[in-house]
């Protein structure tokens, strides 16, 4: 047994209130083991305490953390170890890779400089020898032109390359255990695939153990040998990956597995944690939509360019969106898929004229939205609305929920009096699944999923016909995501809304969309019905995208 | 780089023009009548009229503006109304004295505040840290004037460790005899805000992710602080020093006033009291130019300190 | 889509959660240092109001004490051992024969008896001592507090208003407007602050109102920078985009949506400005460029104190320094506590 965590408890001091120290318990008694040469995955949603557990091993927690319990490594208890001893362990026998490589690397030092640090600190290598070793490390992690990269600065590298540097730094002294805290979460799907493969290969070659933390069961299923599932600071279930995926015992684990949108099935609704725990039956197949519904939005040759300064006085055109066309029918959903930089978000914002388009037409009910006068545009605002990605930034922190919901109605003069508007606001809150008491509360009192519901309710106050959902569920946990997606589907059925659903997550898009556009570098690369696209993608890029998605655990055939 | 420099120099022109316009119109429309000031209290109306002719005050304002601009470009400001000394000469003779006092102050402020701030940042929340914060708060609430008055009285007058006032022609004598007391007082006062500021910079940096990575690599705290954090904190510190540089030219006019040091700051003070417009105008415009050039130099230097900077 | 129009129901009691200011007040209440500072500042404000209304220190200009009267706890000055000229003995010589004014003496004496002159006995000691002319230092200190603090606060409010307005416009709109305001900012900041103050002072002269205007015209730049940065940051945030999407007007977005999110930063900055303006005012008044000749401020007191110190009369210096130090320290601590209460994240990771 390489590392054994026994009854670990971590609490954070939050300052004194009324003379008594306030504490928040992040981890409430967690125990699991990491054997030699094994990958153990620590899975959980946000707030489960998985990161805190991992960071307590080497005591990389903030100053106000208090740990108790035991962490046994090589016969000694790491919790009791003095700082000097911990410092000689860190980077040498136990190393870390963090989630955001851009901020985890020091921006003012070169890659070579940072790579050499652990080599010189622990192995006592001279500068020249260390640099050579650094170069070989970079080659090992698959960095092209490793010699040149040694003198590069972190901001000159892409996200994937930065993460490779982090991995190289962690491997420098051949550690026995690698702690990887959500190492691929911040990366694009295709890059994620490369990094995962790299990690698996390195683990084999160096015969080390890996503690892999993630919220994504798909990733975990592919890479882990043992799985530990956490929720709210406790371990819900742990065991070999085969058993966890094929025969989970704990209801939470079962629910977590079940509420992921799948790439192959067509349910009408996703399973939600509470449904599952309550033991409800699987949902039925979704009904096909009315193919003859009236066309509510038609887009032709939409284009948006940004101008960047170049040279002394010149300007350079950056084409974010070029030539997008589609038709959207009432009650249908158009999915727009792409990685970062594909232009999908820009296109969504341009539909609402939040970015001014540089070309093309958006025809709504016979009128070209892009050619409207300001007054007409104001009236049109009611009919097409948007829900943004970041639930923490889309509600004004200084407005109560009630104020946020009443404002649009006041602007567009819906409802005869303030009392009527407030009544409408309350009923909409209930419709999205929150109770009326939310009316007087502030956004910071709600979770991400709840805030997205409020954002949806805000759009609904205007009775729109088209809703643009710009990565609306991407920042949410899987279980919450399922709830919001179900809500969106219900609202669509009830009000006949048409959606433009923008996302990078193919599985989610498959669940929501009837027709799917795949975008890359501002152009539509492929277009097909949802089910068709997933089953038989025609373009190279689409195939690559599909192939990069982690499928979870698949038993060897 | 050349393109960047050219563009920056080009961009300075409108700003400089703005400064010139500001100074010109400020003095023209709000200032007293220069002719009356020069003529003095007992001048007759004919004398005043003659002076006005001589200064060209009866010509239209845009002509006067033109003359003003010309005097800037040719570095010829005429003579001081009070002393009849050529204004350009003023700069040459007074600047060295100011710099002899101000440069040591700036240097000492930075060099002393840096280690103190680093130390309290390292031991943040401790008794030392909190004591320092309280002490600096109180120290900052007392006017600089009081420090000088008391300091001069105590160290100069009573204890006799330093001369109360004075200046000489030799730089070396100045540095040894006349500069220590003013520098000591100024540094005492300036240390408080600098230390607090640098402390904030260090604490900000300590909250960044790369510090966690450095610790995760097994580096000792000292190395984390002195190598990683310090290097990053140099960026805002450099900005701060760069912003403070133009201020030293006017010097601490208070110090020059109290210690009778013939520097630029004291000159400006005298000029204000005597309504000596040419001096004030000249100093303002030239210092503005100097500030812009210093800012440009700091921006370029930035590239050395922060590799993320792209000079566009 | 159906439009719900239910019968008007009496709205349920809106239990409003605490907003930012309530939460801040709650946090502030737990900060003992902050509360202490608040009490001191409040006491000063009461003093200032009384002084401004003329209820205390109105007669600070009256010379009620002997020149350089020492403070009461020190006791009166020892009588000067001046060289005494021997009073000649013998009767006075009668000069009425040659004195041209002699006939009028009687008449004048009668007239003088009809007029009353108040000759107040001059006190030997005053509570905090007297200055060179015998004016009560305590009254001067109180009046000086009123003037200095008033100037500082008013100038800060004015500078904040200018800076906020311009910063909001520059930060939100960018483009031409932003460029113009940046140019203005550059013009004002390329001249060192002190120099600009002197230039304005040379031209505008002395007086309380003038000082306020000068300080405001010079001091708006720091706030402008910060507000502009905040507005630039917020104007691309999703909640502002969302406000645009629902059709809110530009002014609504700027001042109803963004400004409340920035107001705590502005408030903290303004309190720092107050301190710095008070210090500037003191220096200006010391140099004779600040408040008018008939006014008293901490600065004028310090100006007088310098020459008094050589003679050993330290009380005016002490009084001015004491009042100033207590007020500014309390105000600074208050500002710190305010900043901590409003946004613990603004704190330096304490």
Image (tube, coloured by chain):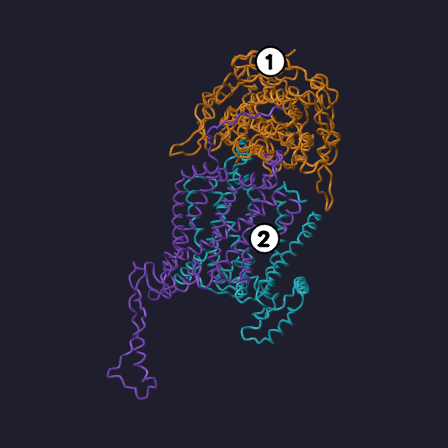
Chain colours: A orange, B cyan, C purple
Q: Quadrant of the N terminus of chain C?
A: top right
Q: Are callouts 2 and 1 both on one chain?
A: no
Q: Which residue is mark 2?
A: C189
Q: Which is more toward the observer, A146 or A100?
A: A100
Q: Is residue A556 above or below residue B288?
A: above
10 Å neighbourhood of mark 2: few (<14), some, or many (≥20)? many
**Quarter location, residue B231:** top right
Q: Is residue A302 above or below residue B162?
A: above
Q: Which is more toward the observer, B164 or A319?
A: A319
Q: Is residue C93 above or below residue A374?
A: below
Q: Which residue is mark 1?
A: A283
Return the x and y of residue A472 as percentages of the image width and height.
61, 27
Chain letter of disc 2 in the image = C
Chain letter of disc 1 in the image = A
Return the x and y of residue C232 as percentages of the image width and height.
60, 41
Q: Mark 2: which secondary structure?
A: helix
Residue A359 visible in the snapshot? yes
CA gap, disc 2 and disc 1: 67 Å
Q: Which mark is residue B285?
A: none
Which label lies toward us, 2 or 1?
1
**Quarter location, residue A12:** top left
Q: Which is more toward the observer, B132 or A368?
A: A368
Q: Mark 1: which secondary structure?
A: loop
In the picture, measured across the screen, residue C101 lies left or right of residue B306, that is left
Query: Which residue is the extreme one toward the front?
Result: C7
10 Å neighbourhood of mark 1: few (<14), some, or many (≥20)? few
Return the x and y of residue A525 as percentages of the image width and height.
74, 26
Return the x and y of residue A105 as percentages of the image width and height.
59, 34
Residue A125 visible in the snapshot? no
Query: Which residue is the extreme one toward the bottom?
Result: C97
Q: Which is more toward the observer, B68 or A350?
A: A350
């Amino acid at each position: 047994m390489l590392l054994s965590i026994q009854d670990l408890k971590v609490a954070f001091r939050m300052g004194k209130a009324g003379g008594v120290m306030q504490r928040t318990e992040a981890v409430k008694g967690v125990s699991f083991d990491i054997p030699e040469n094994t990958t153990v995955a620590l899975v959980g949603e946000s707030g489960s305490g998985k990161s805190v557990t991992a960071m307590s091993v080497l005591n990389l927690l903030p100053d106000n953390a208090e740990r108790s319990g035991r962490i046994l490594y090589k016969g000694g208890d790491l919790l009791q170890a003095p700082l000097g001893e911990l410092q000689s362990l860190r980077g040498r026998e136990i190393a870390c890779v963090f989630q955001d490589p851009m901020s985890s690397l020091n921006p003012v030092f070169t890659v070579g400089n940072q790579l050499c640090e652990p080599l010189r600190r622990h192995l006592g290598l001279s500068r020249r020898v260390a640099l050579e070793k650094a170069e070989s490390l970079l080659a090992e992690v698959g960095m092209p032109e490793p010699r040149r990269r040694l003198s590069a600065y972190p901001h000159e590298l892409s996200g994937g390359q930065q993460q490779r540097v982090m991995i190289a730094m962690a491997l420098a002294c051949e550690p026995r255990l690698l702690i990887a805290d959500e190492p691929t979460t911040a990366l694009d799907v295709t890059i994620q695939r490369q990094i995962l493969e790299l990690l698996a290969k390195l683990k084999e070659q160096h015969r080390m153990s890996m503690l892999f933390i993630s919220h994504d069961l798909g990733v975990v299923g592919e890479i882990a040998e043992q799985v530990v599932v956490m929720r709210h600071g406790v371990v819900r279930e742990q065991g070999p990956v085969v058993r966890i995926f094929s025969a989970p015992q704990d209801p939470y684990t079962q629910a977590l597995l079940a509420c992921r949108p799948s790439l192959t099935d067509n349910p009408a609704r996703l399973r939600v944690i509470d449904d599952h725990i309550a033991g409800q039956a699987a949902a039925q197949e979704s009904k096909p939509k009315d193919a003859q519904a009236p066309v509510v939005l038609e887009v032709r040759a939409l284009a948006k360019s940004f101008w960047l300064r170049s040279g002394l006085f010149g300007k350079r055109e950056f084409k974010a969106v070029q030539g997008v066309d589609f038709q959207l029918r009432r009650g249908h959903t158009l999915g727009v898929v792409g990685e970062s930089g594909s232009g999908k978000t820009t296109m969504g914002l341009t539909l609402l004229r939040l970015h001014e388009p540089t070309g093309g037409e958006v025809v709504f009910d016979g009128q070209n939205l892009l050619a409207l006068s300001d007054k007409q545009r104001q009236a049109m605002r009611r009919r097409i609305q948007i829900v943004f990605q970041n639930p923490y930034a889309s509600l004004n922190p200084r407005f109560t929920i009630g104020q946020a919901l009443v404002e649009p109605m006041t602007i567009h003069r819906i409802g005869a009096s303030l009392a009527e508007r407030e009544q409408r606001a309350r009923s909409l809150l209930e419709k999205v699944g929150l109770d009326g008491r939310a009316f007087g509360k502030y956004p910071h009192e709600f979770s991400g999923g709840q805030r997205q519901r409020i954002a949806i309710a805000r759009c609904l106050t205007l009775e729109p016909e088209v809703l643009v959902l710009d990565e609306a569920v991407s920042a949410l946990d899987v279980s919450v995501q399922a709830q919001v997606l179900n809500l969106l589907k219900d609202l669509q059925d009830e009000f006949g809304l048409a959606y433009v659903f923008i996302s990078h997550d193919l599985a989610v898009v498959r669940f929501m969309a009837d027709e799917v556009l795949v975008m890359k570098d501002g152009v539509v690369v492929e277009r097909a019905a949802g089910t068709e696209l997933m089953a038989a993608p025609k373009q190279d890029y689409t195939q690559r995208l599909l192939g990069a998605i982690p499928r979870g655990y698949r038993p060897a055939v | 780089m050349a393109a960047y420099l050219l563009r920056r120099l080009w961009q300075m022109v409108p700003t400089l023009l703005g400064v010139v316009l500001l100074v010109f119109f400020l003095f023209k429309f709000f200032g007293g009548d220069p002719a009356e000031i020069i003529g003095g209290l007992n001048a007759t109306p004919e004398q005043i009229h003659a002076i006005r002719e001589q200064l060209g005050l009866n010509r239209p304002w845009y002509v006067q503006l033109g003359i003003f601009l010309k005097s800037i470009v040719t570095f010829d400001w005429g003579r001081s109304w009070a002393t009849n000394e050529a204004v350009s000469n003023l700069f040459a003779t007074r600047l060295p004295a100011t710099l002899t006092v101000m440069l040591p102050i700036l240097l000492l402020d930075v060099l002393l505040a840096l280690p103190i701030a680093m130390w309290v940042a390292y031991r943040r929340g401790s008794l030392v840290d909190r004591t320092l914060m309280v002490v600096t708060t109180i120290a900052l609430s007392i006017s600089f004037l009081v420090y000088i008055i008391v300091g001069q009285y105590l160290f100069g007058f009573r204890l006799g460790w330093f001369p109360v006032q004075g200046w000489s022609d030799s730089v070396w004598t100045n540095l040894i005899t006349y500069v220590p007391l003013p520098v000591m007082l100024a540094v005492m006062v300036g240390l408080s805000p600098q230390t607090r500021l640098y402390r904030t910079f260090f604490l900000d940096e300590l909250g960044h992710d790369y510090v966690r990575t450095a610790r995760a690599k097994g580096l000792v705290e000292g190395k984390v602080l002195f190598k990683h954090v310090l290097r990053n904190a140099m960026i805002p510190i450099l900005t701060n020093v760069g912003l403070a540089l133009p201020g030293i030219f006017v010097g601490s006019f208070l110090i020059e006033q109290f210690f009778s040091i013939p520097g630029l700051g004291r000159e400006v003070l005298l000029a204000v009291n005597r309504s000596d417009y040419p001096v004030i105008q000249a100093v303002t415009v030239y210092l503005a130019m100097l500030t812009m050039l210093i800012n440009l130099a700091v921006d370029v230097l930035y590239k050395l300190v922060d590799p993320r900077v792209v000079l566009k | 889509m159906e439009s719900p129009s239910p019968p008007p129901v009496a709205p349920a009691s809106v239990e409003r959660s605490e907003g930012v200011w309530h939460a801040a007040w709650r946090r502030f209440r737990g900060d003992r240092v902050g509360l202490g500072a608040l009490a001191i500042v409040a006491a000063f404000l009461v003093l200032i109001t009384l002084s401004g209304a003329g209820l205390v220190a109105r007669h600070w200009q009256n010379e009620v004490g002997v020149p350089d009267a020492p403070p009461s706890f020190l006791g009166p000055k020892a009588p000067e051992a001046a060289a005494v000229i021997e009073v000649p003995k013998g009767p006075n010589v009668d000069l009425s024969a040659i004195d041209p004014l002699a006939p009028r003496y009687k008449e004048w004496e009668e007239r003088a008896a009809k007029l009353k002159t108040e000759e107040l006995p001059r006190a030997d000691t005053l509570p905090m001592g007297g200055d060179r002319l015998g004016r009560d230092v305590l009254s001067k200190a109180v009046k000086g507090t009123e003037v200095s603090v008033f100037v500082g606060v008013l100038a800060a409010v004015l500078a904040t208003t200018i800076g906020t307005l311009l910063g909001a416009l520059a930060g939100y709109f960018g483009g031409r407007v932003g460029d113009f305001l940046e140019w203005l900012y550059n013009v004002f900041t390329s001249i060192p602050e002190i120099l600009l103050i002197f230039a304005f002072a040379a031209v505008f002269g002395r007086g309380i109102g003038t000082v306020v205007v000068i300080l405001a015209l010079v001091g708006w730049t720091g706030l402008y920078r910060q507000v502009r940065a905040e507005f630039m940051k917020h104007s691309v945030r999703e909640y502002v985009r969302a406000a645009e999407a629902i059709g809110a007007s530009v002014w609504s977005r700027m001042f109803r949506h963004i400004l409340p999110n920035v107001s705590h930063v502005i408030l903290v900055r303004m309190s720092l400005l107050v301190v710095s303006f008070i210090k500037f005012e003191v220096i200006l008044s010391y140099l004779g460029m600040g408040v008018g000749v008939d006014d008293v401020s901490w600065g004028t007191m310090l100006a007088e104190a310098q020459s008094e110190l050589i003679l050993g009369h330290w009380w005016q210096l002490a009084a001015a320094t004491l009042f100033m130090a207590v007020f500014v320290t309390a105000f600074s601590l208050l500002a710190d506590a305010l900043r901590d209460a409003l946004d613990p994240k603004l704190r330096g990771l304490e």
